[in-house]
Image (tube, coloured by chain):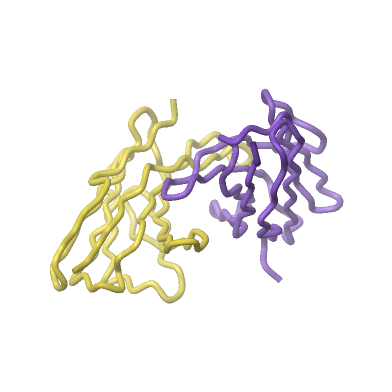
Amino acid sequence: QKEVEQNSGPLSVPEGAIASLNCTYSDRVSQSFFWYRQYSGKSPELIMSIYSNGDKEDGRFTAQLNKASQYVSLLIRDSQPSDSATYLCAVNVYTGNQFYFGTGTSLTVIP
Amino acid sequence: GAVVSQHPSWVICKSGTSVKIECRSLDFQATTMFWYRQFPKQSLMLMATSNEGSKATYEQGVEKDKFLINHASLTLSTLTVTSAHPEDSSFYICSAILGGGPITDTQYFGPGTRLTVL
């Protein structure tokens, strides 16, 4: 089983809708969780980090963490065409800074 | 804050030559940097973890004699692709950790270097 799993998509949503991206992880000692956005041909950029159970909101983005279910999600409200990208989930298992990335979910926001 | 730069952004070289890529943390000190490779439409592949002042730790299957990593200071790590061949053509991305402890360590990525070997 992979350390971090994401649905590869592609996920398509209409402009203005909520996009929901999901990620599960296997290591119960995972400490911190990150969502990155990667545009085609570019490097990943950090969107949000979350460390505690519950929701964390930043503008149109909300990260949700449930450690008991080993599940982290990202909600994008009022999706815009500029949100079209691949979204990477990453987990830090702090045994020597071991980061694990999912393979990414491709999101397309349709105007 | 937390800006990571890479140089060059793109490079074209002849087969058999060596190419050096620099990764710098511009506004923070990075005890740990990572080097990734990404082929078109594929996911990130971690090549090695670089700690300042010590030898890099390479992932399984990555040739350490071909991909030389030097982390000479808290703000600079270099990746040298030795005797490059066309199959080494890829997008190389570095990242650095903005440390705050085991809970808050965050990876920030450089813009990447696109290598084309002719």
- Chain A is shown in which shade? purple
Q: Residue placed farthest to the front in the image?
A: A111
Q: Is residue B69 above or below residue B22?
A: below
Quadrant hosting residue B6: top left
Q: Quadrant of residue A48?
A: top right
**Rendered residue at 33%/31% (across/down):** B26
Q: Residue at x 60, y 50 (%)?
A: A88
Colour assignment, chain B: yellow
Q: Percent x, y for residue B76?
A: 29, 43
Answer with left or right where residue B54 lies relative to residue B18. right
Could you tell me residue B79's position as x and y percent? 28, 56
For the N terminus of chain B, the quadrant is top left
Q: Residue at x 43, y 62 (%)?
A: B40
Is residue B75 left or right of A50 when viewed as pictured?
Answer: left
**For this rendering, which residue is in front, B9 or B65?**
B9
| Image quarter hosting the C terminus of chain B | bottom left
Please give the count of numbered marks on the rendered protein. 0
Residue B27 pos. (x, y %): 36, 27
Which residue is outermost to the right? Answer: A68
Up/down of B81 relative to A29, above or below: below
Instruction: Tell which residue pokes out farthest to the bottom in this image.
Output: B61
Eyeballing the image, is A53 above or below B27? below
Depth order, front residue of B30/B18: B18
Write the residue at 42% across / 52% down: B34
The answer to whether residue A23 is left or right of residue B94 is right
Q: Horizontal and vertical percent for residue A65?
A: 78, 42
Left or right? Give the position of B44 relative to B103: left
